[in-house]
Image: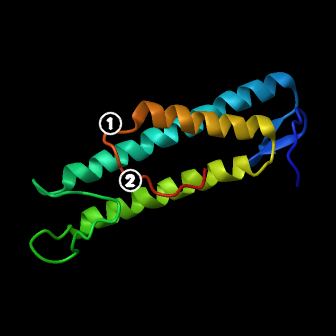
Amino acid sequence: MALNWSTENVCVLFDFWRVNSSTSLVLTCAAVFLLGYLYELARTRVRGWEKSLAPSGTVVSADSGTPLVGPTAIRNATRWKRALFYGLLVAYSYSLMLIFMTYNGFLILAVFGGAVAGHYAYSSDEWGSVRGANCH
C-alpha cells in the first residue's frame, strides 16, 4: 500500500462505504472529519464523567494510583462502566486508525483535521493535562 489521492473505488471501513466520485469523496471526508471531531468530544465527556465520580479532594490523573480496595475504592458497577467506555473508545479510535490506513491522502487529512479541531474545541485549559496515546 502506498499513499494515494484516489477519488474512485476507495473502500472506507465497510464494503458498502465506497468512494466512487468526487461528490462521494467530499461527503466521506466530511463524515470522517466529524468522526474524528466527535471522538475528541467522547473522550472529553468520558474523562469528565470519571472525574465526577472521584471523591471530593481526589486528584484524578491518567496514571492515577486510585486504589481498587479500601476507603476510596471504586465500586464494581462503576469499574464495569469505566471498562465498557474504555472498550468503546478503543474500538472508535481503531476505526479511525483503519480509515487512516486506507492511505488515501484525503481521508488522512480528514482524520487529522477532525482530531485537531476536536482537540482544540474540547481540550482542557490546564497546562500539562495528560493525553494518552491514541490510534489516530
* Residue furthest top as drawn: 23
Q: Residue at x 41, y 60 (%)?
A: 84
Q: What amino acid does circle 2 point to?
A: Val
Q: Secondary structure at mark 1?
A: loop
Residue 63, quarter of the rendered image: bottom left
* Residue furthest bottom as drawn: 69
Residue 36: x %, y % from top left: 57, 39
Position of residue 27 relative to residue 101, above or below, is above
Please tell me which residue lies in front, 117 or 30: 117
Which residue is identified by label 1? 125
Q: Looking at the image, do the residues carrying marks 1 and 2 touch, with CB atoms under 8 Å apart?
A: no
Whether residue 35 sits left or right of residue 25 in the image: it is: left
Which residue is identified by label 2? 130
Please tell me which residue lies in front, 87 or 48: 48
Binning the other alpha carbons within 10 Å of mark 1 as few (below 14), some (14 to 19) or many (20 upward) gives few
Q: Secondary structure at mark 2?
A: loop
Q: What amino acid does circle 1 point to?
A: Asp
Binning the other alpha carbons within 10 Å of mark 2 as few (below 14), some (14 to 19) or many (20 upward) gives few
Position of residue 97 relative to residue 106, above or below, is below
Position of residue 70 relative to residue 112, above or below, is below
Residue 15: x %, y % from top left: 80, 47
First reached walking from the N terminus: tag 1 or tag 2: 1
Position of residue 43 relative to residue 119, above or below, is below
Q: Residue at x 29, y 45 (%)?
A: 48
Which quadrant is home to the N terminus?
bottom right
Q: Residue at x 21, y 49 (%)?
A: 52
Residue 29: x %, y % from top left: 71, 31
Whether residue 36 sits left or right of residue 11 in the image: it is: left
Residue 9, quarter of the rendered image: top right
- Spatial CA distance of label 1 from label 2 is 12 Å
* Residue furthest front as drawn: 127
Whether residue 49 sits left or right of residue 99 in the image: it is: left
